[in-house]
Image (tube, grey):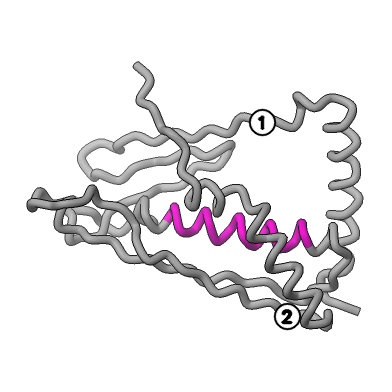
């Protein structure tokens, strides 16, 4: 018996309910997610609301921050990691693959020179992003390979990074 069997059984049942909901009313499958952030007085820290959760984000002392929370690039990588873990759970439930543990380690590089006002050729952005998926399971290597493949195809945040969408500033 795998450690996550009870959770994956519950996840599988909920996924079946959502499939039925979305088949009956396809418009329910398109959800809106939102976040907001603002500066907190003279600290420069940024309370950031995501759904009903409030998290303080900040810069490192090297950019006049106080390291009171993750930086925005760290949050982006954290969002990818979290979505990957969740997608592994979803796909394991859909594919009936037993899991004991899922952990994602992700990193990327960021050229800070343009951020601090130095000349640049390319706009600053995270580069060389890579992740390692640590999967503990007694599933076969073929099942785990299929799990990896399905996660790569269906992870929404991963796909948003891989295949960028337009972001517009709305007045």
The location of residue 75, given as percent across then percent down, is: 44, 54
The location of residue 55, given as percent across then percent down, is: 46, 47
The quarter of the picture where the N terminus appears is bottom right
Return the residue at label 2: 136
Is residue 134 positioned above or below 11 on the image?
Answer: below
Name the residue: 49% across, 42% down.
54
The local crowd at label 2, few if under 14, some if 14 to 19, many if 20 or more residues have their Cα within 10 Å, is some
Earlier sequence position, callout 1 versus callout 2: 1
Badge 2 element: strand
Span shown in magenta: 75-91
- Residue 83 falls left or right of residue 58: right
The location of residue 80, given as percent across then percent down, is: 53, 56
The quarter of the picture where the C terminus appears is top left
- Residue 32 falls left or right of residue 106: right
Q: Is residue 90 magenta?
A: yes
Judged from this view, the residue extending furthest toward the top is 171
Return the residue at label 1: 31
Pick the front one: 149 or 101 = 149
């Amino acid at each position: 018996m795998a450690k996550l069997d009870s959770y994956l059984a519950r996840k599988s049942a909920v996924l079946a309910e959502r499939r039925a909901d979305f088949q009956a009313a396809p418009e329910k499958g398109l959800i809106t997610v939102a976040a907001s952030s603002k500066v907190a007085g003279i600290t420069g820290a940024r309370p950031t609301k995501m759904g009903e959760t409030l998290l303080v984000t900040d810069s490192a002392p090297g950019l006049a921050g106080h390291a009171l929370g993750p930086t925005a690039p760290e949050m982006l990588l954290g969002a990818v990691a979290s979505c990957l873990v969740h997608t592994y759970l979803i796909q394991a439930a859909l594919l009936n693959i037993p899991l004991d543990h899922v952990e994602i380690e992700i990193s990327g590089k960021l050229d800070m020179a343009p951020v601090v006002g130095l000349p640049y050729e390319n706009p600053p952005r995270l580069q060389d992003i890579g992740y390692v998926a640590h999967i503990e399971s007694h599933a076969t290597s073929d099942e785990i390979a299929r799990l990896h493949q399905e996660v790569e195809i269906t992870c929404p945040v991963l796909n948003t990074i891989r295949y960028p969408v337009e972001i517009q500033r709305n007045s």
